[in-house]
Image (spheres, coloured by chain):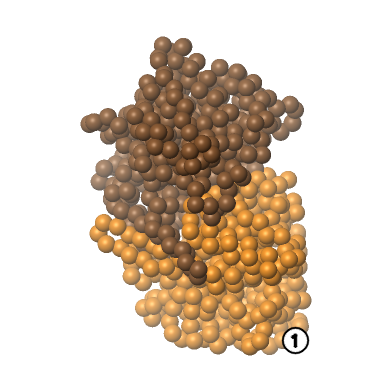
Chain colours: A orange, B brown
Amino acid sequence: ADIVVLPGDGIGPEVAAAAVDVLQAVATRFGHRFSLHEHLIGGAAIDATGTPLPDATLAAARAADAVLLGAVGGPKWSDPNASVRPEQGLLAIRKALGLYANLRPTKPHPAALGASPIKPHLLAGVDLLVVRELTGGIYFGDKTRDADTASDLCRYSVHEIERVVRRACLLARDRRGHVISVDKANVLETSRLWRDVASRIARDEFPDITLEHQLVDSMAMHLLSKPRAFDVIVTENMFGDILTDEASMLAGSLGLLPSASLGDDAMPGAGSTASGRARGIFEPIHGSAPDIAGRGIANPYGAILSAALLLRHSLDLAREAACIEAAVDGALAAGVFTADLAQTGAAVSTREATTAVL
Amino acid sequence: ADIVVLPGDGIGPEVAAAAVDVLQAVATRFGHRFSLHEHLIGGAAIDATGTPLPDATLAAARAADAVLLGAVGGPKWSDPNASVRPEQGLLAIRKALGLYANLRPTKPHPAALGASPIKPHLLAGVDLLVVRELTGGIYFGDKTRDADTASDLCRYSVHEIERVVRRACLLARDRRGHVISVDKANVLETSRLWRDVASRIARDEFPDITLEHQLVDSMAMHLLSKPRAFDVIVTENMFGDILTDEASMLAGSLGLLPSASLGDDAMPGAGSTASGRARGIFEPIHGSAPDIAGRGIANPYGAILSAALLLRHSLDLAREAACIEAAVDGALAAGVFTADLAQTGAAVSTREATTAVL
Ligand SMILES: CC(C)[C@H](C(=O)O)[C@@H](O)C(=O)O
Ligand SMILES: CC(C)[C@H](C(=O)O)[C@@H](O)C(=O)O
């Protein structure tokens, strides 16, 4: 299998290297051949080529079976009014590859609860998956700016809503069969369309799945007050951005959390099951953390667990994915904590944490 | 002073009645005359008149010194595709009265921390105020819907941003002098304008205030991981809706939290200080809670504390406001808990809680 690696900026290269080591160990142990190729994205790409998503990177990503990404951005390129910014590379590659479904699972590890701001008794048994729409909504609508005003258009088509809700329902089928669709239907027209389409898809195509609706403001509360109540949460791009970062606090540290951004199956005829091979980018949900970059202390678990998602979703290697997940669980259970997780006592380095997983 | 009371739906009338009793007690004790008039809004207004904001209600609110509101909405009127909905009354009155600044203070009471999902050691000393823009953004932009797509336009003018940032800075001056402006400037054009305008206002008009910027996704985390770090948070309408509901979890119960929606000073020549008299609607941040409506068990503290904000912001009666706040503090310290707050032991009724405050 052909895997493109986009290390990016800040701690991106450090955690991507850890994930690559783990992928290589899996290849050896299970007798696979992964051919890994590094390309530029984000600030590193701006510095080298003047653009955050060079053509060579996009072409390689299109040709690959899957993409593993570190993180993009940093103070060097942080002026929001600059015409070229690292995040544009990330937004552009998601859009160009058609990766409309962003999966962000949160399952707090018992050993890491100390690092969460949430009371531990609320976290026992939490196992939720946010499916965020990733290539539509206000992120990609028309934008205007003049001296006196600015605007961003939030737009959704029936097709865009259908496909992400369908994906959420398919994923729920392999879990506890429950989907909550989050919107702001008491205010937004896009949310009223979202609600109608989600109801129809669930009713017509997924009689085995329970779908409920929830307003985004009340979801922001319930995520904290009763996180165990949720299985799959599906929502639009902007709400998903906010709610997934909020949900990450349940897990204790952002550094632990992986994500998968999936499009439709790259292979003809397939694409009808959640477990089929889908084109995707896999990245930890943390950012480039410029404050700790270069010090070798970043938490590599989120990137390593992203490699597991890559194996499961793009290469259909579920057993190998589970093996990585068990290894990370084991490292956490043994108290192998990087600085973001260590409440007391010494923290390990990125390398030591990776070695524990290996 | 002339105060319009809009009880609304569900538990709205129950908590509004509690706040009215407290206002009347303040009038007696401090020798004021408050003349209180009830009007219809929300579902109750739809049932009686066919519209969620009858002309008589709007005219009375315009003529009054301040408006006290209960809550609107309920399952009876909950179809998001209905052409007439209770929330429209709330959105329309905010807009018609020009109430562009929604103040939502959160200061967890030590006695109520048991009800919060957040670990108590993180909550000690938390005292934050969210100032949410309330009459612009995606709530009020053009909307479209056809068979295949829907859209909502998010639009902000320089003027709309200036006035709410200015109000946040004025409020910070009476607090700890620190403002965080929350946006999504790495993606939205409206946020880039917001950031530019906020920076300029702070630099040119408030050299004594520290203003920093934060992305909304990272704010959703930091509100939980380091809530003590915040003083005043200013943000646009939609982000404010989500973040204030999230922040309410710091206080243990939504039922405790008041809000003030302020316009510019109703009196000519004034409006330049945060403590001047401003036209406003004052309401608890909780909803109509149809599940407990009519049972006399709703938490009245949020509505009562909203009456305190009314006295402070619209009637310039700071001493009277502080007196109410001290009475609520005292009731909480004495363990007078409604069902939403009581962890163990018996909960008191709305009436008993109100009597404790009185
Ligand atoms: C960097 C930014 C554009 C991005 C987003 O908002 O999608 C990030 O916050 C994320 O969630 O992956
Ligand atoms: C009822 C609804 C329209 C309203 C809003 O979103 O503004 C409510 O959630 C609030 O925050 O006051």
Q: Given the image, on which type of amino acid does mark 1 rest?
A: Gly
Residue at image coords 52%, 25%: B19
Q: Is residue B258 visible?
A: no
Nearest to the observer: residue A72 or residue B184:
B184
Residue A321 picture location, percent across and down: 72, 74
- The residue sitting at 36% across, 27% down in the picture is B65
User: Residue A244 versus residue B143: which sits nearer the camera?
Assistant: B143
Check disc 1 and report the residue beneath it.
Answer: A31
Q: Decide if residue A154 is on the left or right side of residue B279.
A: right
Q: Nearer the viewer, residue A244 or A40?
A: A244
Q: Work out whether B358 lies above or below B188.
A: above
Figure check: A81 above or below B35: below
On the picture, is B236 further left or further right than A228?
A: left
Does ligand 1 reach within 8 Å of label 1's beta carbon?
A: no
Q: On the image, which quarter does residue B1 sit in?
A: top left
Q: Is residue B39 left or right of residue A335?
A: left
- Image coordinates for residue B179, horizontal then vertical, percent: 39, 44
